[in-house]
């Protein structure tokens, strides 16, 4: 299935992004509207999974790959020790806007607590 989401276009280099990580399965790029000093999105490159709720058991390893890519990036960039947050929004109440699963990595300053607005 062709991935016509915004992130599909970034994977195919049809629209620009500041790519900071890439391997066989995962792409990492800077969020265009950062919510913290460091805000990077990690996405699976080869499978179109609209939301976490669509994830199939055979695809479960991809979530681990996203998490490992984020953790590795944090270590290399030197903020793993101070800490960071990873977030995955699922559908409307969480504010999901791009329907290709992605892990947000937020870091670089103390992050406030979060919950219902
Ligand atoms: P979500 O709200 O969880 O679906 O997250 C989507 C994220 O994509 C938001 O944080 C947006 O700021 C980010 N975003 C939207 N367009 C772009 C883009 N062209 N390049 C990088 N990040 C983007």
Image (tube, rainbow, N blue to C red):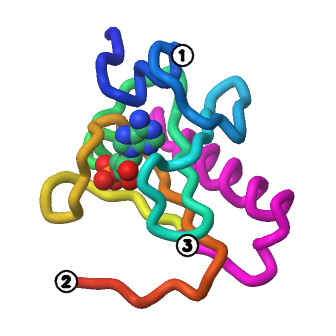
Which is nearer the N-term, disc 3 or disc 1? Answer: 1
Residue nearest the viewer, comparing 82 with 16:
16
Indicate the secondary structure of the residue bearing disc 2. loop
Which secondary structure dominates the residues rendered in magenta?
A: helix
Which is nearer the N-term, disc 3 or disc 2? Answer: 3
* Residue 85 in sight from this viewpoint: yes
Could you give the CA–CA distance between mark 3 and mark 2, rounded to whole angstroms? 17 Å
Which class describes the residues within 10 Å of circle 2: few (<14), some (14-19), or many (20+)? few
**Residue visible at 59% across and 68% down in the picture:** 37
**Residue visible at 57% across and 47% down in the picture:** 30
Q: Nearer the viewer, mark 2 or mark 1?
A: 1
Q: Which residue is mark 3?
A: 85
Q: Which residue is mark 2?
A: 116
Indicate the secondary structure of the residue bearing disc 1. loop
Q: Which mark is residue 13?
A: 1
Residue nearest the viewer, comparing 54 with 14:
14
Query: Which residue ends up furthest to the left in the rendered image?
Result: 92
**Residue visible at 35% across and 28% down in the picture:** 6
């Amino acid at each position: 299935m062709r991935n016509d989401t915004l992130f599909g276009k970034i994977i195919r280099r049809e629209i620009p992004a500041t790519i900071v990580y890439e391997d066989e399965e995962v792409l990492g790029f800077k969020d265009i509207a950062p919510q913290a000093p460091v805000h990077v999105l990690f996405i699976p490159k080869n499978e179109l999974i609209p939301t976490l709720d669509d994830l199939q058991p055979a695809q479960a390893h991809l979530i681990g790959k996203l998490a490992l890519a984020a953790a590795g990036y944090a270590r290399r960039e030197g903020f793993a020790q101070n800490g960071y947050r990873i977030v995955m929004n699922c559908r409307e109440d969480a504010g999901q806007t791009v329907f290709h699963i992605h892990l947000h990595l937020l870091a670089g300053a103390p992050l406030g607590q979060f919950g219902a607005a």
